[in-house]
Image (cartoon, rainbow, N blue to C red):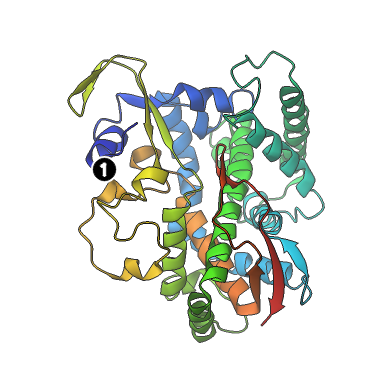
Amino acid sequence: MVTEPELIEYVLMQNKEVFTIGRQQRETFNGIEDQAVTANSGDRWKRLRNGLQPAFAWENIQRYGSQMAERTVNHVDRWEADDRIDVLHEMRLLTLRILGDTLLGIDIEGDEEIVRNAADAFLDQTDPRRFGRLLPKWVPTPTQRRINHAVEDLDAYIAGVIADRSPGDDVGSVLLEAHERGDLTMAEVRDNMTALLLAGHDTSAVALTYAWYELSRHPEIRESLAEETENVIRNGSLSGDDFDALERTRNVIKETLRLYPPTWGVNREAIETVTLGGYELPAGTQVMMPQWVVHRDDRFWEQPETFDPSRWKRESNRPEYAYFPFSGGPRHCIGMRFARLELVVSLATMVHHVDLDVSVTEPLTFAPKISLQPEADIGAIVHKS
């Protein structure tokens, strides 16, 4: 385990050619996203990354802000005052529908269960506490059978979406243009759309869930966000152009990602013998860099266990890699800009329309799956603004 920011930077940035994605990551995505950027390395990874990158340039991402806000308004308008909701379930539906609009260019409503079944099976597969976790995938355990069926259904769904789609301004259209240029194969388009859909909705959903948990515990911060949104919003809706003006909301998201990083650890594997922090690591050594630990290290953070968005307004000389919720280096999360915009616009829009009174008062416990899942349901009562 590596928790020194300068060594994390060395692994992820300075000596990136020696440290590739770890065995655990390759095995996790095997059979699900084999031809996606998340599961590859070397020259193939570079080609895939280059093919995907234009879709995630800020000038392309920013235009999705209005769609994100409109979808969020549509989602919360379905809630009635005093409704009791499962926050994570609702955030998953919201982020899936946003990805349907912006990734697939379709209204995914009604088809969410296909994606959720695959995502749930995927999460269960990556639970380190699962019985049979170390068995090879060809062993027909109940979990493995479930994920096989769910992935088959999702593959068929994505293939159908690709076959039926029309050109548009969504991410999927950019990937298909890359295919037409010969930059990506159709299998690579499909697997990368699958990867973006699975990972993109769940990580954002858990982040929004934890944000609401903290806002419910700190009503003064929630009121501050509502005031900010009231001052920024125009014509009843936010857009990507409002991102910079939503400073308080951005800081709440930053602080949420610090305390509750959806991806709670980054894994790399040394492909040759290398010295790290004075220790010689033989080829094949697995290196874990846990955001959960580094983000709560009191060497870098004042009162690290305290939810304090205002810390982001203060000057700090903390090392760059004391905070890396989206990983770092060339392999940083390709959807980072998309996720930041989605989280800020969605949270600000929700705060403008509703308040969620989260019923959980005790400290949260977590299931350390591939993303940081709450161990128990997080319920809330809806109050309309």
Q: Position of residue 175 (x, y in %)?
A: 57, 42
Crowd rating for badge 1 (residues with CA inside 10 Å; few <14, some 14–19, many 20+)? some
Total labels: the figure holds: 1
Residue underneath mark 1:
5
> Could you tell whether 249 is left or right of 366 in the image?
left
In this orientation, does residue 60 appear?
Answer: no
> Could you tell whether 102 is left or right of 245 in the image?
right
**Which sits in the foreground, 213 or 14?**
213
Where is the N terminus found, in terms of image quarters?
A: top left
Q: Where 179 sits versus 84, above or below?
A: above
> Could you tell whether 342 is left or right of 315 in the image?
right
Residue occupying the far right of the picture: 110
Element type at mark 1: helix
Q: Amino acid at mark 1?
A: Pro
**Which sits in the foreground, 206 or 57?**
206
Q: Where 341 sits versus 115, above or below?
A: below
Q: Quadrant of residue 188?
A: top right
Q: Where 217 sits versus 210, above or below?
A: below
Residue at horizontal 54%, vertical 82%? 233
Q: Position of residue 336 (x, y in %)?
A: 46, 51
Q: Position of residue 141 (x, y in %)?
A: 73, 19
